[in-house]
Image (tube, rainbow, N blue to C red):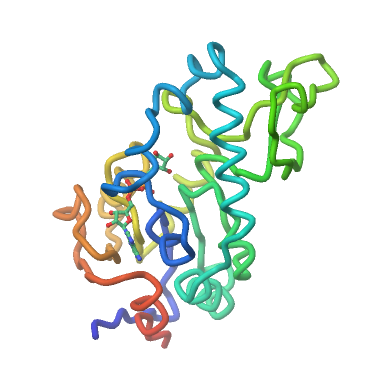
Amino acid sequence: MASISVAPVDRVFVLTGAGISAESGLPTFRAEDGLWAGYSVEDVCTPEAWKRDPAGVWAFYAARRAAGLKAEPNPGHIALARLEARLGDRFFLCTQNVDDLHERAGSVRLVHMHGELAKARCERECGRPPVEDRTIYRSLDEVGRCPCGGRLRPHIVFFGEIPLEMEHIEREIAKASLMVVVGTSGSVYPAANFVHWARQGGARTVYVGPEPPLNASAFTHVVEGKAGEVLSGLFQVR
Ligand code: APR
């Protein structure tokens, strides 16, 4: 099996997508039986959908919360947490996933660029930070309000909104000498561009997943396989 050498001077930036949680039983988005085969993005994941049908948007994310609560981290999440434990500040994880399986596996230095299922925030963007919210809402009447009066919306970056923590992410990519991308189809920007930014900075770039992503040609290595099977034996830390 392929192995990737991590030297004492290396700084590792990892980007994960839905594929890393697939072996925990959470569906990806673009597979034939994926989430976007059963739902339309325009109906559940846009600012317009939220304005038109907040009950429908909450119903979709309540179902995702219920599925996320039942799921457990798999060996892929655990391998990344173990790598972080060895590398400390030389490791950084950016996930597009809204589940909390990385945290539950032990990852600490991570950002959720597309938001978090277990949080909600004010729809009015009044400036108050997101709040913990794990309620599985059955109707819109159960959804709370912010002290300013705005309705709480899922703490999810809808299509058309700007991903979270972008300045922090860009700084970490600029410092990285190795980028490892796991389980993302390379179809959503800006995440699909991270590999290009890393290469501009001279980093090695590795993709891990069962099939090449759309941006496969930008990687220096593509390791074909499932995250849960590949990641635990992939890194040779020197
Ligand atoms: N291990 C690794 N990768 C896997 C596995 C696995 N066991 N199973 C599937 N994959 C890969 C697929 O080959 C695919 O390339 O995971 C990828 C999932 O791609 P998408 O469904 O497009 O998910 P993702 O790239 O994370 O989507 C990006 O799109 O809808 C939005 O906001 C949502 O964050 C999401 C973004």
Q: Residue furthest left?
A: 217
Coordinates of residue 11 in the picture (x, y in percent): 44, 67
Q: Dividing the picture into quarters, in which one does residue 182 lie? A: bottom left
Q: Residue furthest top?
A: 52
Q: Residue at x 55, y 68 (%)?
A: 73
Coordinates of residue 136 in the picture (x, y in percent): 69, 41
Q: Residue at x 32, y 70 (%)?
A: 226
Give the quadrant of the N terminus.
bottom left
Pick the front one: 19 or 115? 19
Pick the front one: 89 or 120? 120
Coordinates of residue 88 in the picture (x, y in percent): 58, 72
> Vertically, is 67 above or below 146?
below
Q: Residue furthest front?
A: 138
Pick the front one: 219 or 63? 63
Q: Residue at x 21, y 61 (%)?
A: 211
Q: Dividing the picture into quarters, in which one does residue 69 lie? A: bottom right
